[in-house]
Image: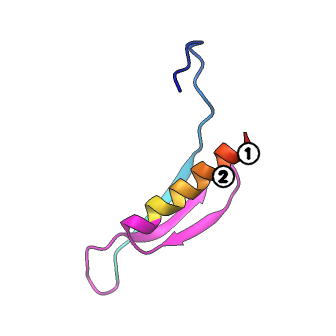
Amino acid sequence: MQNSSGVRAPAMSFILRLWPDSDGDSTMRGEIENVGTGEKRAFLDYWSLLKLLDSWREDADTAR
């Protein structure tokens, strides 16, 4: 949805921590923290990270 008032819509901020896989694979794993709530969640690959972000987005949409 376009905002014509020039005011930016509320945003969510995250801290993303990444570490290498112990097997030496190039798989992305780590932890993401929602700065606003302090909630931390681990992820094991790119797709699980996207799923976490999407679930937080859906939660924010529901709360509005």
Q: Secondary structure at mark 2?
A: helix
At x 37% / y 65%, what residue is drawn? 46
Q: Secondary structure at mark 1?
A: helix
What range of the chain is rendered magenta?
22-48
Q: Amino acid at mark 2?
A: Asp
Check residue 59 in the rendering and tell me which mark sits there, or answer none.
2
Q: Nearer the viewer, residue 40 or 57?
A: 57
Q: Residues within 10 Å of mark 1 (few under 14, many from 20)?
A: few
Quarter of the image with the C terminus in it = top right
Residue ranking furthest to the top: 5
Check residue 22 in the rendering and tell me which mark sits there, or answer none.
none
Q: Residues within 10 Å of mark 2 (few under 14, many from 20)?
A: few
Residue 45 is situated, as x and y percent measured from the top left of the image, at 39, 71
At x 57% / y 24%, what residue is drawn? 8
Residue 33 is situated, as x and y percent measured from the top left of the image, at 58, 59
Residue 3 is situated, as x and y percent measured from the top left of the image, at 56, 19
Discs 1, 2 touching: Cβ within 8 Å: yes
Check residue 63 in the rendering and tell me which mark sits there, or answer none.
1
Q: Amino acid at mark 1?
A: Ala
